[in-house]
C-alpha cells in the first residue's frame, strides 16, 4: 500500500482554504449586521449592510450544503 502524498497535501490545502474562507465570510456577515445596528442608531436604514450580511450567510450556507452533497453518497 502506498500513499499519494501529493494528493493528500492537495486535499489538506483545499480543506483548510475552504474552512478559512467560510469562517471569514461568516465573520464578515456578522460584522455587517453589527454595522447595520450602528447605522440604524445614527438614523440611517442600514439596508446595504443587511443585504451584505444576507449574501454572506447565503454563500456560507451554499458552501456547507455543497460539502454535504459531496460527502453523502445518496445525494448523487
Image: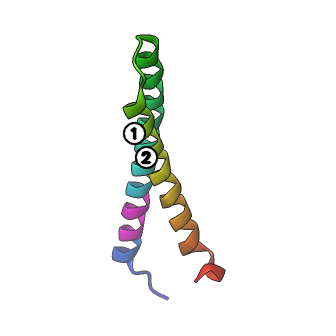
**Is residue 16 toward the left or the right of residue 68 in the image?**
left
Q: How many marks?
A: 2
Residue 32 picture quarter:
top left
Residue 34 x, y percent position in the rendering: 47, 24
Q: Is residue 30 above or below residue 61?
A: above
Q: Residue 71, image x and y in percent?
A: 58, 73
Category of crowding for the residue at label 2, using alpha-carbon neighbours closer than 10 angstroms: few (below 14), some (14–19), many (at least 20):
some
Kindly state the secondary structure of the residue where label 2 is placed: helix
| Residue displayed at 42% across by 39% down | 51
For this rendering, which residue is in front, 5 or 11? 11
Q: What main secondary structure does the magenta stretch of the protein show?
A: helix
Magenta stretch encompasses residue 10: yes
Q: Are marks 2 and 1 in contact (CB under 8 Å)?
A: yes
Q: Residue at x 37, y 33 (%)?
A: 48
Q: Residues within 10 Å of mark 1 (few under 14, many from 20)?
A: some
* Span highlighted in magenta in the image: 9-15
Q: Secondary structure at mark 1?
A: helix
Q: Residue furthest bottom?
A: 1
Give residue 55's mark: 2
Residue 50 lies in what quarter of the image? top left
Return the x and y of residue 4 as percentages of the image width and height.
39, 81
Pointer 1 residue: 52
Amino acid at each position: 500500500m502506498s500513499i499519494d502524498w501529493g494528493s493528500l497535501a492537495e486535499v489538506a490545502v483545499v480543506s483548510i482554504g475552504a474552512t478559512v474562507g467560510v469562517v471569514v465570510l461568516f465573520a464578515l456577515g456578522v460584522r455587517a449586521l453589527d454595522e447595520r445596528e450602528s447605522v440604524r442608531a445614527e438614523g440611517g436604514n442600514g439596508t446595504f449592510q443587511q443585504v451584505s450580511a444576507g449574501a454572506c450567510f447565503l454563500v456560507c450556507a451554499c458552501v456547507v450544503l455543497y460539502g454535504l452533497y459531496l460527502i453523502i453518497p445518496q445525494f448523487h
